[in-house]
Image: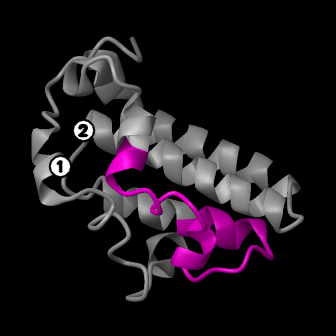
């Protein structure tokens, strides 16, 4: 399935995750998330900007959590949308928050085994798409 799972009903997930002003503040050449947001916890900062964005992610994406492929395809579609215009620290953190939101949805909907598939999917996406960018900026520190 890949990115074709991304339908018009949820193709703008990332677009409204951050307002234009906040997205503009995120310099992709910053060497760490702390340099972008200072000492604030980056995840907390994103949740403050849009408090509902990382809750009920499956519902926002209009997916049911009945199979691993549905969950991972939807996640990869969102990931592709997030990074379509390039990589920034804010987008990296947002990707992890989307994954966390989907993981919470899986557990709440009695599908905890799906979390392992989601974690594997996230790890593979980071290895294939983000690892070089992260290394060039000194990693997670």
Residue bounds of the magenta highlight: 46-74
Residue 3 at x, y percent in the picture? 45, 71
Residue that carries the numbered disc 2 in the rendered image? 88
The residue nearer to you, when weighing 47 against 95, is: 47
The residue nearer to you, when weighing 60 against 118, is: 60
Using the image, determine if residue 92 lies above or below residue 54.
above
On-image quarter of the N terminus: bottom right
Judging from the image, what secondary structure is the residue with disc 2 in? loop
Inspect this view and state whether residue 129 appears: no
Q: Is residue 138 left or right of residue 99?
A: left
Residue 76 within the magenta-colored segment of the rendering: no
Give the foreground label among 1 and 2.
Answer: 1
Residue at 29 percent of width and 28 percent of height: 133
Considering only order in the chain, which callout, 2 or 1, is on the residue closer to the N terminus? 1
Residue 21 at x, y percent in the picture? 11, 52
Residue at 17 percent of width and 23 percent of height: 30
Give me the C-alpha separation between circle 1 and circle 2: 9 Å
Label 1 CA crowd tier, 10 Å (few <14, some 14–19, many 20+): some
On-image quarter of the C terminus: top left
Residue at 36 percent of width and 57 percent of height: 50
- Tell me whether the residue at label 1 lies in contact with that at label 2, contact meaning CB atoms closer than 8 angstroms: yes
Label 2 CA crowd tier, 10 Å (few <14, some 14–19, many 20+): many
Q: State the scheme by which the image is colored.
A: one colour
Residue that carries the numbered disc 1 in the rendered image? 23
Judging from the image, what secondary structure is the residue with disc 1 in? helix
């Amino acid at each position: 399935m890949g990115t074709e799972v991304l339908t018009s009903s949820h193709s703008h997930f990332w677009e409204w995750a951050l307002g234009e002003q906040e997205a503009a503040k995120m310099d992709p050449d910053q060497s760490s998330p702390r340099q972008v947001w200072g000492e604030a916890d980056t995840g907390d900062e994103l949740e403050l900007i849009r408090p509902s964005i990382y809750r009920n992610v499956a519902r926002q994406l209009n997916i049911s959590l009945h199979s691993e492929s549905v969950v991972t395809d939807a996640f990869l579609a969102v990931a592709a949308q997030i990074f379509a215009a390039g990589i920034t620290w804010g987008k990296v953190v947002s990707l992890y928050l989307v994954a966390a939101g989907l993981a919470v949805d899986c557990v709440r909907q009695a599908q905890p085994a799906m979390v392992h598939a989601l974690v594997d999917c996230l790890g593979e996406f980071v290895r294939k798409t983000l690892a070089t960018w992260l290394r060039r900026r000194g990693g997670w520190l």
